[in-house]
Amino acid sequence: MLRTMVGVALSLSAASPLDAQGTAARVPFELGESLTYDVRFGAIKVGTGRMRVLARDTVRGRDAWHVRFSVSGGTFFYRVNDVYESWMDVTTLNSLRYQQDLNQGSRDRERRFEIYPDRAVYRETTRNGPERPSVSDPLDDGSFLFFIRTVPLEVGRSYTFNRYFRPDRNPVIIRVLRREKVRVPAGEFDAIVIQPVIKTSGIFSEGGQAEIWLSDDERRMMIQMKSRLSFGSLNLYLRSFRLSAAAPEEEGPDQP
C-alpha cells in the first residue's frame, strides 16, 4: 500500500532546469536538507516519514545527488519499513541509479536498478537482469518528489509527461488543482496542490483522489500528502525540517 502511494506517483517529467552555462540544474534543495513527517492512518499516528538529501556522490563518473525517501511504522496488525533511494545527475536531474528496500507486513522486497540516460536503457541488477529499453531523460520513483520541486506549475493546468524510466508506466499526468493555506505540525504554509495520475490500479490511478501539497515559495517542500483509499486514508504531514547541513532543525508549535 505505501509502496503504491510513494512509488506510483513518482514519475513526473519536464525539461531539465539547467543554469545559464548548462553545467548544473538549479534546484531548491541543498546538501543536508531533511524533512520529517508524521504518518497517519485516518486520525491515528502510525509512523514517521523522511525526505533527505544525503550526499553528492559519483555514479559512473557523473556527479549525482543522493536522495532518500523513507516511511516506517504501522499498527499492531500491519508494519511498514520502506526506503527509496535515488541518484540524480546534478546537471540534468536524470536518474542514474535507483534502489528499493520494501518491508510491508510479512513481505520483504529489495530491487536495484542501474539507469543509463545516454543510451535510454535500464537494468535490474538485483537479479542480474538484461538491459531493457527506457526513455529519454528518465526519472524513477524516489527522484520524483525532489524533481517536482523544480518544475513551474500553473493552477488550472494539467501536464502530461513520458519520463518514467519504465516505459509501460507512462504517461504521467500532473493536475495543478489550487493554492491554499495549510496547517501541519511544522506550522502554517501557503501551498500549491497537485494531483498525480498514472496508469495503475493504485492510489494514483485515473479514478484516484490523492493530493500533494508543495510550499508555494522558492523551496517547494512537500508539506503534506493525502490519499483516499477504499478502507480509509493514509496521510503524511510535515513535522519538522532542516534546510541544509548547517541550518538548525525547525519544528512547529504542534510538535510533541
Image: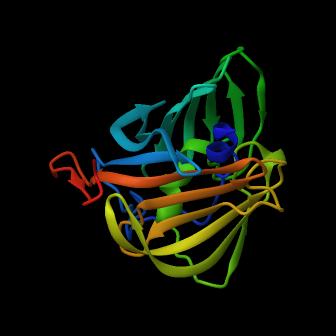
Nearest the camera: 227 or 15? 227
Q: In the rendered image, which quarter is residue 211 located in?
A: bottom right
Residue 92 visible to the viewer: no
Drawn side of residue 207 relative to residue 8, left or right: right
Question: Residue at left 79%, top 54%?
Answer: 170
Question: Residue at left 63%, top 78%?
Answer: 177
Q: How many marks?
A: 0
Nearest the camera: 11 or 56? 11
Nearest the camera: 161 or 226? 226
Q: Measuring from the top left, give residue 6's x and y in whole percent.
A: 61, 45
**Image height check: is 28 above or below 118?**
below
**Image height check: is 121 above or below 30?**
above
Residue 60 visible to the viewer: yes
Drawn side of residue 162 relative to residue 65, left or right: right
Question: Residue at left 66%, top 52%?
Answer: 9
- The quadrant of the image that shows the N terminus is top right
Q: Measuring from the top left, give residue 223's x and y in whole percent.
A: 44, 61
- What scheme was used to colour the molecule? rainbow
Question: Residue at left 51%, top 66%?
Answer: 213
Drawn side of residue 36 relative to residue 236, left or right: left
Q: Measuring from the top left, give residue 163's x and y in whole percent.
A: 69, 54
Drawn side of residue 204 relative to residue 35, left or right: right
Nearest the camera: 123 or 84? 84
